Image (cartoon, helix red, strand yellow):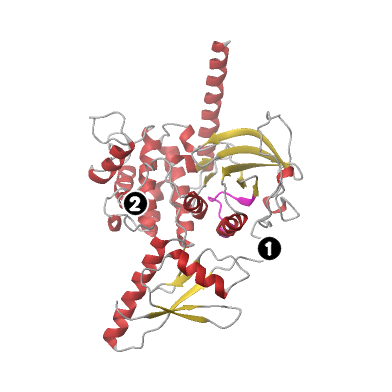
Protein backbone atom coordinates (compact mmCIF):
# COMPACT_ATOMS: atom_id res chain seq x y z
CA UNK A 1 0.00 0.00 0.00
CA UNK A 2 1.58 3.29 -1.10
CA UNK A 3 -0.86 5.94 0.17
CA UNK A 4 -1.32 7.28 3.66
CA UNK A 5 -4.31 6.18 5.69
CA UNK A 6 -6.15 7.57 8.71
CA UNK A 7 -6.60 5.97 12.12
CA UNK A 8 -9.53 7.55 13.95
CA UNK A 9 -9.11 7.35 17.72
CA UNK A 10 -12.65 7.36 19.07
CA UNK A 11 -13.08 9.35 22.27
CA UNK A 12 -16.50 8.70 23.86
CA UNK A 13 -15.98 11.66 26.21
CA UNK A 14 -15.15 14.24 23.54
CA UNK A 15 -14.09 14.79 19.95
CA UNK A 16 -12.58 11.94 17.98
CA UNK A 17 -8.98 12.36 16.87
CA UNK A 18 -7.81 11.56 13.31
CA UNK A 19 -4.22 10.39 12.96
CA UNK A 20 -2.73 10.34 9.46
CA UNK A 21 -0.33 7.41 9.29
CA UNK A 22 2.67 7.46 6.99
CA UNK A 23 4.72 4.69 8.57
CA UNK A 24 3.31 1.26 7.73
CA UNK A 25 5.70 -0.50 10.14
CA UNK A 26 3.81 0.71 13.20
CA UNK A 27 4.29 -1.29 16.38
CA UNK A 28 1.60 -1.86 18.97
CA UNK A 29 3.60 0.32 21.36
CA UNK A 30 3.63 3.17 18.79
CA UNK A 31 -0.16 3.17 18.75
CA UNK A 32 -0.39 3.13 22.55
CA UNK A 33 1.96 6.12 22.73
CA UNK A 34 -0.27 8.14 20.40
CA UNK A 35 -3.36 7.13 22.37
CA UNK A 36 -1.69 8.27 25.58
CA UNK A 37 -1.59 11.78 24.11
CA UNK A 38 -5.35 11.62 23.48
CA UNK A 39 -6.00 10.27 26.99
CA UNK A 40 -3.22 11.85 29.08
CA UNK A 41 -4.81 10.90 32.40
CA UNK A 42 -5.29 7.22 31.61
CA UNK A 43 -3.00 4.24 31.10
CA UNK A 44 -4.05 2.67 27.80
CA UNK A 45 -3.00 -0.97 27.42
CA UNK A 46 -5.31 -2.20 24.65
CA UNK A 47 -7.89 -1.05 22.12
CA UNK A 48 -10.75 -2.44 20.05
CA UNK A 49 -11.71 -2.36 16.39
CA UNK A 50 -14.86 -3.53 14.63
CA UNK A 51 -14.71 -6.53 12.30
CA UNK A 52 -16.90 -7.26 9.27
CA UNK A 53 -19.53 -8.92 11.49
CA UNK A 54 -19.87 -5.86 13.69
CA UNK A 55 -18.05 -7.54 16.60
CA UNK A 56 -15.45 -5.62 18.56
CA UNK A 57 -12.03 -7.30 18.59
CA UNK A 58 -9.46 -6.41 21.23
CA UNK A 59 -5.84 -5.73 20.22
CA UNK A 60 -3.08 -6.29 22.79
CA UNK A 61 -0.03 -7.21 20.72
CA UNK A 62 1.81 -6.60 17.45
CA UNK A 63 0.42 -9.88 16.12
CA UNK A 64 -3.19 -8.93 16.81
CA UNK A 65 -2.58 -5.46 15.38
CA UNK A 66 -1.26 -7.06 12.19
CA UNK A 67 -4.55 -8.96 11.89
CA UNK A 68 -6.45 -5.67 12.29
CA UNK A 69 -4.41 -3.94 9.57
CA UNK A 70 -4.83 -6.91 7.23
CA UNK A 71 -8.61 -6.71 7.72
CA UNK A 72 -8.62 -2.93 7.14
CA UNK A 73 -6.45 -3.04 4.02
CA UNK A 74 -8.75 -5.70 2.54
CA UNK A 75 -11.65 -3.28 3.09
CA UNK A 76 -9.69 -0.47 1.43
CA UNK A 77 -9.17 -2.69 -1.62
CA UNK A 78 -12.91 -3.36 -1.77
CA UNK A 79 -13.70 0.36 -1.45
CA UNK A 80 -11.27 1.15 -4.26
CA UNK A 81 -12.78 -1.45 -6.58
CA UNK A 82 -16.30 -0.16 -5.96
CA UNK A 83 -15.39 3.53 -6.20
CA UNK A 84 -16.49 4.20 -2.60
CA UNK A 85 -14.68 6.72 -0.41
CA UNK A 86 -12.10 5.18 1.92
CA UNK A 87 -13.18 5.37 5.56
CA UNK A 88 -10.76 5.85 8.48
CA UNK A 89 -9.74 2.88 10.58
CA UNK A 90 -11.70 3.47 13.80
CA UNK A 91 -10.10 2.24 17.03
CA UNK A 92 -11.58 2.40 20.51
CA UNK A 93 -9.03 2.74 23.35
CA UNK A 94 -9.84 0.63 26.40
CA UNK A 95 -9.75 3.28 29.10
CA UNK A 96 -9.56 1.67 32.58
CA UNK A 97 -12.62 1.84 34.77
CA UNK A 98 -12.67 4.46 37.57
CA UNK A 99 -11.02 3.17 40.73
CA UNK A 100 -14.29 3.18 42.66
CA UNK A 101 -16.25 1.05 40.20
CA UNK A 102 -16.86 -2.49 41.36
CA UNK A 103 -16.75 -5.60 39.26
CA UNK A 104 -19.22 -8.47 39.17
CA UNK A 105 -17.79 -9.91 42.40
CA UNK A 106 -18.20 -6.59 44.24
CA UNK A 107 -14.45 -5.89 44.28
CA UNK A 108 -12.07 -3.28 42.94
CA UNK A 109 -8.42 -3.62 41.97
CA UNK A 110 -6.00 -2.24 44.55
CA UNK A 111 -3.39 -0.33 42.56
CA UNK A 112 -1.11 0.84 45.35
CA UNK A 113 1.94 -1.22 46.19
CA UNK A 114 2.12 -2.50 49.73
CA UNK A 115 5.03 -2.90 52.10
CA UNK A 116 3.65 -6.19 53.41
CA UNK A 117 6.25 -8.95 53.79
CA UNK A 118 6.57 -11.69 51.21
CA UNK A 119 4.17 -14.55 51.89
CA UNK A 120 5.41 -17.43 54.01
CA UNK A 121 3.42 -20.68 54.09
CA UNK A 122 1.81 -21.55 57.43
CA UNK A 123 0.75 -24.98 58.61
CA UNK A 124 -2.92 -25.40 57.71
CA UNK A 125 -5.23 -25.94 60.67
CA UNK A 126 -8.64 -27.58 60.59
CA UNK A 127 -11.13 -24.80 61.24
CA UNK A 128 -14.90 -24.90 60.87
CA UNK A 129 -15.70 -22.07 58.44
CA UNK A 130 -19.09 -20.93 57.25
CA UNK A 131 -19.23 -20.45 53.49
CA UNK A 132 -19.44 -16.79 52.53
CA UNK A 133 -20.93 -15.56 49.27
CA UNK A 134 -18.19 -14.46 46.90
CA UNK A 135 -19.91 -11.13 46.36
CA UNK A 136 -19.67 -10.38 50.09
CA UNK A 137 -15.94 -11.01 50.26
CA UNK A 138 -13.78 -8.01 51.00
CA UNK A 139 -16.63 -5.60 51.70
CA UNK A 140 -14.31 -2.61 51.43
CA UNK A 141 -13.80 -3.41 47.77
CA UNK A 142 -10.05 -3.90 48.18
CA UNK A 143 -7.74 -6.78 48.93
CA UNK A 144 -5.24 -5.93 51.65
CA UNK A 145 -2.12 -8.13 51.82
CA UNK A 146 -2.16 -7.94 55.61
CA UNK A 147 -5.55 -9.69 55.67
CA UNK A 148 -4.28 -12.80 53.88
CA UNK A 149 -2.91 -15.80 55.80
CA UNK A 150 -0.83 -18.18 53.68
CA UNK A 151 -1.75 -21.71 54.73
CA UNK A 152 0.10 -24.01 52.35
CA UNK A 153 1.71 -24.26 48.92
CA UNK A 154 -0.61 -25.75 46.33
CA UNK A 155 1.88 -25.80 43.48
CA UNK A 156 4.94 -24.26 41.86
CA UNK A 157 5.35 -23.37 38.19
CA UNK A 158 7.72 -21.43 35.97
CA UNK A 159 5.65 -18.26 36.44
CA UNK A 160 5.10 -18.38 40.19
CA UNK A 161 3.75 -20.16 43.26
CA UNK A 162 0.11 -20.87 44.12
CA UNK A 163 -0.93 -20.77 47.79
CA UNK A 164 -3.99 -21.84 49.68
CA UNK A 165 -4.87 -18.82 51.81
CA UNK A 166 -7.40 -17.56 54.32
CA UNK A 167 -8.88 -14.07 53.99
CA UNK A 168 -9.20 -13.18 57.66
CA UNK A 169 -11.99 -10.54 57.55
CA UNK A 170 -14.41 -12.89 55.76
CA UNK A 171 -13.01 -16.28 56.86
CA UNK A 172 -12.94 -17.22 53.17
CA UNK A 173 -10.48 -19.69 51.65
CA UNK A 174 -8.88 -18.38 48.43
CA UNK A 175 -6.11 -19.39 46.05
CA UNK A 176 -3.40 -16.78 45.55
CA UNK A 177 -0.90 -17.00 42.72
CA UNK A 178 2.27 -15.01 43.49
CA UNK A 179 4.45 -14.03 40.52
CA UNK A 180 7.77 -12.18 40.89
CA UNK A 181 7.93 -9.13 38.57
CA UNK A 182 10.69 -6.58 39.01
CA UNK A 183 8.95 -3.71 37.23
CA UNK A 184 8.09 -0.05 37.67
CA UNK A 185 4.92 1.23 39.40
CA UNK A 186 3.66 2.44 36.00
CA UNK A 187 3.86 -1.08 34.56
CA UNK A 188 2.27 -2.43 37.73
CA UNK A 189 -0.74 -0.24 37.00
CA UNK A 190 -0.73 -1.45 33.41
CA UNK A 191 -0.85 -5.09 34.51
CA UNK A 192 -3.65 -4.44 36.98
CA UNK A 193 -5.54 -2.60 34.27
CA UNK A 194 -5.15 -5.56 31.92
CA UNK A 195 -6.39 -7.92 34.62
CA UNK A 196 -9.69 -6.05 34.47
CA UNK A 197 -10.57 -8.46 31.68
CA UNK A 198 -11.11 -11.12 34.32
CA UNK A 199 -13.93 -9.05 35.78
CA UNK A 200 -15.96 -9.73 32.62
CA UNK A 201 -16.02 -13.42 33.30
CA UNK A 202 -19.09 -14.46 35.27
CA UNK A 203 -19.72 -18.07 34.35
CA UNK A 204 -19.94 -21.30 36.40
CA UNK A 205 -17.06 -22.97 34.53
CA UNK A 206 -14.66 -20.00 34.86
CA UNK A 207 -12.66 -19.58 38.07
CA UNK A 208 -13.86 -16.63 40.16
CA UNK A 209 -11.45 -13.67 40.23
CA UNK A 210 -11.38 -11.63 43.45
CA UNK A 211 -8.67 -9.07 42.71
CA UNK A 212 -4.93 -8.45 42.54
CA UNK A 213 -2.27 -6.40 44.31
CA UNK A 214 1.46 -5.71 44.21
CA UNK A 215 3.84 -6.11 47.15
CA UNK A 216 7.65 -6.09 47.02
CA UNK A 217 7.85 -6.61 43.26
CA UNK A 218 5.42 -9.52 43.33
CA UNK A 219 1.95 -9.57 41.86
CA UNK A 220 -0.63 -11.61 43.76
CA UNK A 221 -3.69 -12.76 41.83
CA UNK A 222 -6.53 -13.86 44.14
CA UNK A 223 -9.04 -16.40 42.86
CA UNK A 224 -11.60 -18.95 43.94
CA UNK A 225 -10.19 -22.06 45.69
CA UNK A 226 -10.95 -25.50 44.23
CA UNK A 227 -10.35 -28.24 46.77
CA UNK A 228 -9.83 -30.97 44.18
CA UNK A 229 -6.84 -29.31 42.53
CA UNK A 230 -5.97 -29.63 38.85
CA UNK A 231 -6.47 -32.56 36.50
CA UNK A 232 -2.73 -33.19 36.26
CA UNK A 233 -2.98 -34.64 39.78
CA UNK A 234 -5.19 -37.57 38.77
CA UNK A 235 -3.41 -39.39 35.95
CA UNK A 236 -5.76 -41.52 33.86
CA UNK A 237 -9.43 -40.51 34.10
CA UNK A 238 -12.17 -42.96 32.94
CA UNK A 239 -14.28 -41.80 30.00
CA UNK A 240 -17.60 -41.67 31.88
CA UNK A 241 -16.00 -39.08 34.20
CA UNK A 242 -13.80 -37.40 31.63
CA UNK A 243 -16.72 -36.99 29.21
CA UNK A 244 -18.62 -34.88 31.72
CA UNK A 245 -15.49 -32.91 32.53
CA UNK A 246 -15.02 -32.30 28.79
CA UNK A 247 -18.55 -30.87 28.55
CA UNK A 248 -17.68 -28.25 31.18
CA UNK A 249 -14.36 -27.43 29.49
CA UNK A 250 -16.03 -26.90 26.12
CA UNK A 251 -18.74 -24.72 27.66
CA UNK A 252 -16.12 -22.64 29.45
CA UNK A 253 -14.04 -22.16 26.31
CA UNK A 254 -17.14 -21.21 24.32
CA UNK A 255 -17.97 -18.59 26.95
CA UNK A 256 -14.46 -17.10 26.74
CA UNK A 257 -14.52 -17.12 22.95
CA UNK A 258 -17.90 -15.35 22.98
CA UNK A 259 -16.15 -12.51 24.85
CA UNK A 260 -13.34 -12.50 22.24
CA UNK A 261 -10.96 -13.98 24.83
CA UNK A 262 -8.62 -16.79 23.88
CA UNK A 263 -7.51 -19.07 26.69
CA UNK A 264 -4.02 -19.51 25.15
CA UNK A 265 -2.92 -22.07 27.74
CA UNK A 266 -5.37 -25.00 27.75
CA UNK A 267 -3.73 -27.92 29.57
CA UNK A 268 -4.59 -30.28 32.47
CA UNK A 269 -2.89 -28.10 35.10
CA UNK A 270 -5.23 -25.22 34.15
CA UNK A 271 -8.40 -27.28 34.57
CA UNK A 272 -9.55 -27.45 38.20
CA UNK A 273 -12.08 -29.71 39.93
CA UNK A 274 -13.76 -29.74 43.32
CA UNK A 275 -15.18 -32.39 45.64
CA UNK A 276 -18.62 -31.04 44.69
CA UNK A 277 -18.04 -32.11 41.09
CA UNK A 278 -17.39 -28.60 39.77
CA UNK A 279 -15.01 -28.07 36.82
CA UNK A 280 -13.42 -24.66 36.19
CA UNK A 281 -10.87 -23.14 33.82
CA UNK A 282 -8.10 -20.97 35.23
CA UNK A 283 -4.93 -19.10 34.14
CA UNK A 284 -6.43 -17.93 30.87
CA UNK A 285 -6.22 -15.00 28.54
CA UNK A 286 -4.53 -11.75 29.25
CA UNK A 287 -2.93 -12.40 32.63
CA UNK A 288 -0.51 -15.07 31.36
CA UNK A 289 -0.04 -13.28 28.04
CA UNK A 290 0.74 -9.95 29.68
CA UNK A 291 3.11 -11.39 32.25
CA UNK A 292 5.03 -13.15 29.49
CA UNK A 293 5.23 -9.92 27.47
CA UNK A 294 6.47 -7.94 30.49
CA UNK A 295 9.20 -10.43 31.39
CA UNK A 296 10.08 -10.73 27.69
CA UNK A 297 11.19 -14.32 28.13
CA UNK A 298 10.03 -17.60 26.71
CA UNK A 299 10.12 -19.94 29.68
CA UNK A 300 10.01 -23.63 28.99
CA UNK A 301 8.23 -25.39 26.13
CA UNK A 302 4.48 -25.28 25.77
CA UNK A 303 3.89 -28.86 24.75
CA UNK A 304 0.22 -28.14 24.16
CA UNK A 305 0.81 -25.54 21.42
CA UNK A 306 -0.86 -26.00 18.07
CA UNK A 307 1.47 -26.39 15.05
CA UNK A 308 0.72 -22.85 13.80
CA UNK A 309 1.83 -21.38 17.13
CA UNK A 310 5.03 -23.43 17.10
CA UNK A 311 5.76 -22.09 13.62
CA UNK A 312 5.10 -18.49 14.70
CA UNK A 313 2.13 -18.12 12.34
CA UNK A 314 -1.04 -16.19 13.15
CA UNK A 315 -3.34 -18.12 15.42
CA UNK A 316 -6.77 -17.83 16.97
CA UNK A 317 -9.54 -19.92 18.51
CA UNK A 318 -8.51 -23.07 16.53
CA UNK A 319 -5.27 -23.04 18.53
CA UNK A 320 -7.27 -23.46 21.75
CA UNK A 321 -9.19 -26.31 20.08
CA UNK A 322 -5.92 -28.15 19.34
CA UNK A 323 -4.77 -27.73 22.96
CA UNK A 324 -8.11 -29.09 24.14
CA UNK A 325 -7.54 -32.22 22.05
CA UNK A 326 -4.02 -32.75 23.42
CA UNK A 327 -5.27 -32.29 27.00
CA UNK A 328 -8.10 -34.81 26.59
CA UNK A 329 -5.68 -37.31 25.05
CA UNK A 330 -3.34 -36.96 28.01
CA UNK A 331 -5.92 -37.34 30.77
CA UNK A 332 -7.69 -40.18 28.95
CA UNK A 333 -4.49 -42.23 28.70
CA UNK A 334 -2.69 -41.00 31.80
CA UNK A 335 0.38 -39.87 29.89
CA UNK A 336 1.44 -37.07 27.58
CA UNK A 337 0.62 -38.22 24.00
CA UNK A 338 3.96 -37.32 22.38
CA UNK A 339 6.17 -38.81 20.98
CA UNK A 340 3.92 -40.43 18.38
CA UNK A 341 6.59 -42.93 17.34
CA UNK A 342 8.38 -45.47 19.58
CA UNK A 343 11.88 -44.34 18.61
CA UNK A 344 12.28 -42.15 21.69
CA UNK A 345 10.78 -42.26 25.17
CA UNK A 346 11.85 -38.73 26.03
CA UNK A 347 12.04 -35.78 23.65
CA UNK A 348 14.11 -32.64 23.99
CA UNK A 349 12.25 -29.33 23.77
CA UNK A 350 13.31 -28.82 20.16
CA UNK A 351 12.50 -32.41 19.18
CA UNK A 352 9.06 -32.07 20.75
CA UNK A 353 8.28 -28.95 18.73
CA UNK A 354 9.53 -30.67 15.57
CA UNK A 355 7.32 -33.62 16.38
CA UNK A 356 4.25 -31.41 16.80
CA UNK A 357 4.87 -29.76 13.44
CA UNK A 358 6.02 -32.71 11.32
CA UNK A 359 4.62 -35.95 12.80
CA UNK A 360 1.06 -37.15 12.37
CA UNK A 361 -1.02 -36.10 15.39
CA UNK A 362 -1.57 -38.79 18.03
CA UNK A 363 -4.98 -40.44 18.19
CA UNK A 364 -7.09 -42.24 20.78
CA UNK A 365 -7.24 -46.01 20.16
CA UNK A 366 -10.82 -46.86 19.25
CA UNK A 367 -10.40 -50.24 20.89
CA UNK A 368 -10.25 -48.61 24.33
CA UNK A 369 -12.52 -45.58 23.94
CA UNK A 370 -15.88 -44.81 22.43
CA UNK A 371 -16.09 -43.95 18.74
CA UNK A 372 -17.53 -40.54 19.68
CA UNK A 373 -14.62 -39.69 21.98
CA UNK A 374 -11.96 -40.79 19.50
CA UNK A 375 -13.67 -38.82 16.72
CA UNK A 376 -13.91 -35.69 18.87
CA UNK A 377 -10.19 -35.70 19.67
CA UNK A 378 -9.27 -36.46 16.06
CA UNK A 379 -11.26 -33.46 14.84
CA UNK A 380 -9.68 -31.17 17.45
CA UNK A 381 -6.17 -32.23 16.46
CA UNK A 382 -6.23 -31.47 12.75
CA UNK A 383 -2.96 -29.86 11.68
CA UNK A 384 -4.73 -27.33 9.46
CA UNK A 385 -6.48 -24.80 11.75
CA UNK A 386 -9.45 -24.32 9.42
CA UNK A 387 -10.18 -28.05 9.56
CA UNK A 388 -10.76 -27.97 13.33
CA UNK A 389 -14.33 -27.62 14.63
CA UNK A 390 -15.76 -24.15 15.18
CA UNK A 391 -17.01 -23.39 18.72
CA UNK A 392 -20.64 -24.27 17.98
CA UNK A 393 -19.57 -27.47 16.22
CA UNK A 394 -17.76 -28.55 19.38
CA UNK A 395 -20.96 -28.15 21.38
CA UNK A 396 -22.97 -30.10 18.81
CA UNK A 397 -20.54 -33.03 18.55
CA UNK A 398 -22.02 -36.39 19.56
CA UNK A 399 -19.35 -36.87 22.27
CA UNK A 400 -20.38 -33.66 24.04
CA UNK A 401 -24.10 -34.33 23.60
CA UNK A 402 -23.65 -37.86 24.98
CA UNK A 403 -22.24 -36.63 28.29
CA UNK A 404 -24.09 -33.30 28.62
CA UNK A 405 -26.46 -34.56 31.33
CA UNK A 406 -25.47 -32.16 34.14
CA UNK A 407 -24.46 -35.06 36.41
CA UNK A 408 -21.84 -33.52 38.69
CA UNK A 409 -22.27 -36.31 41.22
CA UNK A 410 -20.30 -38.74 39.03
CA UNK A 411 -17.38 -36.28 38.95
CA UNK A 412 -17.69 -35.58 42.69
CA UNK A 413 -17.64 -39.25 43.67
CA UNK A 414 -14.64 -39.97 41.49
CA UNK A 415 -12.67 -36.91 42.72
CA UNK A 416 -13.37 -37.74 46.38
CA UNK A 417 -12.34 -41.35 45.82
CA UNK A 418 -9.09 -40.41 44.09
CA UNK A 419 -8.23 -37.83 46.76
CA UNK A 420 -8.76 -40.50 49.42
CA UNK A 421 -6.43 -42.86 47.53
CA UNK A 422 -3.78 -40.15 47.23
CA UNK A 423 -4.03 -39.36 50.95
CA UNK A 424 -3.75 -43.04 51.90
CA UNK A 425 -0.73 -43.45 49.66
CA UNK A 426 0.96 -40.48 51.31
CA UNK A 427 0.30 -41.92 54.77
CA UNK A 428 1.83 -45.25 53.78
CA UNK A 429 4.90 -43.50 52.34
CA UNK A 430 5.30 -41.49 55.55
CA UNK A 431 5.05 -44.65 57.67
CA UNK A 432 7.69 -46.37 55.54
CA UNK A 433 10.05 -43.45 56.00
CA UNK A 434 9.76 -43.53 59.82
- In this picture, residue 200 sits left or right of residue 28: right
Please tell me which residue lies in front, 164 or 393: 164
Residue 390: horizontal and vertical position, in percent?
Answer: 35, 58
Position of 28 relative to 53 (above/below): above
Figure quadrant of residue 192:
bottom right
The residue identified by callout 2 is 309
Q: Within the magenta stretch, is there residue 362?
A: no
Magenta residues (range) = 199-213
Residue 302: horizontal and vertical position, in percent?
Answer: 39, 43
- In this picture, residue 199 sits left or right of residue 27: right
N-terminal label among 2 and 1: 1
Work out whether residue 160 can be spotted. yes
The residue identified by callout 1 is 99
Alpha carbon separation for disc pair 2 and 1: 36 Å
Work out whether residue 58 can be spotted. no
Figure quadrant of residue 23:
bottom left
Position of 20 relative to 352 (above/below): below
Amino acid sequence: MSENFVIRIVNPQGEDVDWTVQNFDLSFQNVLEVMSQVFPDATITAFDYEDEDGDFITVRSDEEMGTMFSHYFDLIAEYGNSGMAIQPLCVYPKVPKPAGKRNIHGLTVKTKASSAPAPQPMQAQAVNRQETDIKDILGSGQISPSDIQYLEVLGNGHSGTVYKTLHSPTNKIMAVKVIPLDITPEIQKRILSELQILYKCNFPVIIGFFGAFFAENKISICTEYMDGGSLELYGCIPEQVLGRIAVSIVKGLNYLWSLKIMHRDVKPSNILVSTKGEVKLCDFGVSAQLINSITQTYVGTNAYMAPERVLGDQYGVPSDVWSLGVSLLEIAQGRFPYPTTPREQELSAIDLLQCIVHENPPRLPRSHFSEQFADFVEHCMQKTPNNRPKPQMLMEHSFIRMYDDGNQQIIAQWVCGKLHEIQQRKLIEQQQMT
